Amino acid sequence: MARKEFGVVGLGKFGLSLAESLMKHGQQVVGVDSDPDKVKAASETLTHAYQAEAVDKVALEQLGFGELPEVIVSTGHSMEASILVTLFLKELGCRSVTVKAISRDHEKVLRKVGADAVIFPERYAAEQLAAKLAVPGLIDYLPLGTNIILKELVVDKWSGKTLRELDLTNNFGVQVVAVKGAEEKQFTFVPKASAPLTKGDTLAVIGNAESLAAVGS
């Protein structure tokens, strides 16, 4: 995996969690916040953490945020701060700026000042939870299109058949991406279409909710 350097503006709950997750993925992260306690906590795990007012364009420039390839802006519920920081980052030459928004109107303004991507973490978390509650066996709800989900199916009546024989893609419009044997702990990705399935095997299948609801394993 290529090692990149990310900037995170705002080291509150979301910003710090995101920064720490990026670090766990082997990336470098530079964080900035005006709160000294948040900066102190972040300095224990991030590549660099600075105390500064992010709404100060000069401070952002001096810290090199305009030269970073990716910056995520998470300034809490301050719409004004996130808009100004986004504007300054784009003026400083930052190639990609992702911003946490709190409303659709907020998103519209962020787009106008140059935000490359806008996220709604709370809404995404709510959609994930709703999908898990509504779809038994759900692994993940994927924002790839309408109701695209990754779901586990446990083999019963398909025992003895191969994925080629089942032809789930053409028959149901879904795709098997991994298989885990009944006695195995790990999934095998890109499974062989010629291998017969066994009762108790678990399939990781991707497709829309309606198609997966029609599949009986």
Image: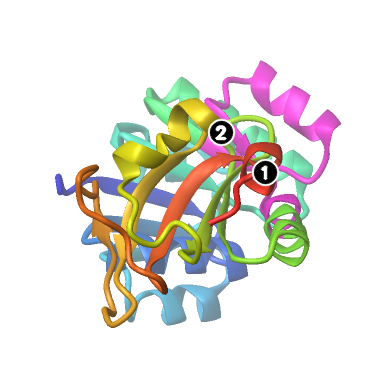
Q: Nearer the viewer, residue 85 or 124?
A: 124
Q: CA distance from mark 1 to mark 2?
A: 7 Å
Q: Position of residue 138 (x, y in %)?
A: 60, 61
Mark 2: few, some, or many residues within 10 Å (few <14, many ≥20)? some
Q: Nearer the viewer, residue 145 or 60?
A: 145
Please state which amino acid type lies under the numbered disc 2.
Phe
Please state which amino acid type lies under the numbered disc 1.
Ala
Please identify the residue farthest to the left as the structure is shown.
Answer: 2
Q: Position of residue 84 (x, y in %)?
A: 64, 34
So how many labels did they put on this image?
A: 2
For the record, the magenta segment spans: 98-125
Q: Position of residue 123 (x, y in %)?
A: 75, 51
Whether 94 is drawn above or below 74: the answer is: above
Look at mark 1 in the image and give the residue it sits on. Answer: 214
Q: Position of residue 19 (x, y in %)?
A: 41, 62
Q: Is residue 196 visible?
A: yes
Q: Are marks 1 and 2 in contact (CB under 8 Å)?
A: yes
Look at mark 2 in the image and give the residue it sits on. Answer: 172
The reply to whether the magenta stretch includes residue 112 is: yes
Helix, strand or loop at label 2? It is helix
Q: Nearer the viewer, residue 178 or 104?
A: 178
Q: Nearer the viewer, residue 171 or 12?
A: 171
Whether 136 is drawn above or below 72: the answer is: below
Q: Quadrant of residue 79?
A: top right
